[in-house]
Image (cartoon, rainbow, N blue to C red):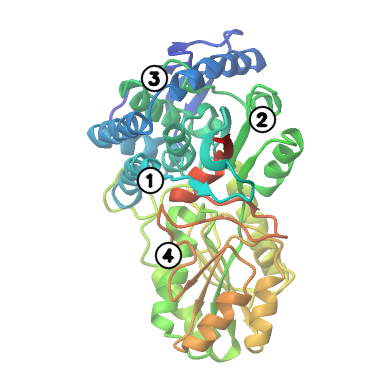
Amino acid sequence: MEHSVVLAHHFIAGKWTPSHSGKTFEARSPYDDKLLAVLAEGDRSDAQDAIKAAEAGHKALSKMSAWDRSRLCNRVADIIDKRRDELALTLAREQGKPLASEAYGEVDAAATGFREAGELIKWLEGEFIPVETPGKRAISFRQARGVYAIVTPWNFPINIPVEYLAPCLAAGNAVVWVPAPTTSLCAVKLMECIVEAGLPDGAVNLVLGPGAVVGDEIVANPGTHGIGFTGSPQTGSAIAKRGAGKPMLLELGGNGPVVVLDDADLDRAAQAAAFGCFFNAGQVCAATGRILVTEKNHDALAARIAGIAEKIRLGDPLLAETTMGPLNNPQVIAKVEQHVADGLSRGADILTGGKKGAGLLYHPTVMGRVDRQALLNTSETFGPVAPLVVCADDADLLDTANASSHGLAASVFTRDLSRAFSFGEKLRAGLVNINSPSCYWELHLPFGGASGKASGLGRLGGKHTLREVTDVKTITFDIS
């Protein structure tokens, strides 16, 4: 498909504007390296302008009723639907996920996210609180915090921003948004939809450029009053330090275990594990990072997953027959290669894959008998690799799953309801799916990391996000 190169700017104070410095950077396809766009590269002064604009944007939003903001969110959703083909095509070109099987689904989820926020804000109720003192009355309600700093990743560059933008807008928070540089064109296209819906000037501001500069500025600047971030634990830790004292919603990495008990339906477990490992080429926070299984089922499960992997069509994300596209950037493929090489050096077997294709393509890989000390088990790979680790029994399966520093999502396969409940309660993860992929989630469900793990703070999802981005305000009255 032919395309023209886009020239794109920041969106600040209701206007598309170039950087103060005049600097730009390029957006290129991870599949064929074609130039897609030339984008404004912001610096701290651009971010500061956006924060100032957001102050005015918050004042305008605070004058709107919840029903007005609900209608705004629903208009954005309608425009996303109208521009569905354009958004999906941009997503496939710039991020690399297959157009037919994945990109359209992400765009549809983004529209749903705006609609859900628009509905839920109308029912975000407060309460009348009984008090001891005669003649006094007390009420509490949720109130927007002001200006939110939102920093988003490249793996789901249309939907993940909506997980923050929609609840913030619905609640009355203004936003300064910094997207990942490698998917900034996706951010521009989503921003166009929001602008077309008719939001107040300054309500949402988009600043493009390196996260270490513009992202750092919006996180640390005292003009922002809350932080939302999805990304790596390392960057999340840096953000937590730079934004110390502000309310934060951080959805960080995972190394989700799929725990396959001896009585599991192996066909079902294999399908779920393969989906969790290979969806979006494994570039998912809740991906299946490792598959824990006893000796009894290891070989049969590994063979089933390998059979599924070999049917995946690797290639051009714009082609209908492609079911896995390229990895998004060179750093990701380098990490995958490092983890696979480390696993091999520790005695793992490769059943299929284990090699690069052209450019940033990497063949879906299944590795058996992976050592527990291997990076594939101890660290987040974020690529299309299915590593199987052999455990002795239920206790060993649980201990190995919980030994990870991550605790975002997990799944358990068993036919025994009591064992399912036992593992569900004891696994140190914010989300545990029974007989479903580790990455199963719906937009209204609470999603986030377990305490004491490196997978984040707070909960995304439906009403839970609305609670995270608002304060509880209490007002008392003396009616005596």
Tag shown at residue 275: 4
Q: Earlier in the sequence, mark 2 or mark 3?
A: 3
Give the answer, above or below, for where 76 lies relative to 289: above
In the foreground, 419 or 281: 419
Secondary structure category for the residue under label 3: strand
Q: Identify residue type, mark 1.
A: Trp
Secondary structure category for the residue under label 4: helix
Crowding near pointer 3: few (<14 within 10 Å), some, many (20+)?
Answer: some
Residue identified by numbered label 2: 219
- In three-dimensional space, the C-alpha distance between marks 1 and 2, rounded to whole angstroms, equals 30 Å
Q: Is residue 236 left or right of residue 166?
A: right
In the foreground, 234 or 217: 217
Q: Earlier in the sequence, mark 4 or mark 1?
A: 1
Q: Earlier in the sequence, mark 4 or mark 3?
A: 3
Residue identified by numbered label 1: 123
Question: Which of pointers 4 and 1 indicates the residue nearer the eye?
Answer: 1
Question: Which of pointers 4 and 2 indicates the residue nearer the eye?
Answer: 2
Crowding near pointer 1: few (<14 within 10 Å), some, many (20+)?
Answer: few
Question: Which of pointers 1 and 3 indicates the residue nearer the eye?
Answer: 1
- Whether label 4 touches label 2, CB < 8 Å: no
Which quadrant, please, contains the C terminus? top right
Secondary structure category for the residue under label 1: helix
Q: Position of residue 126 (x, y in %)?
A: 48, 45
Q: Residue at x 68, y 84 (%)?
A: 396
Q: Residue at x 58, y 39 (%)?
A: 474
Residue identified by numbered label 3: 6
In the foreground, 448 or 170: 170
- In three-dimensional space, the C-alpha distance between marks 4 and 3, rounded to whole angstroms, equals 34 Å
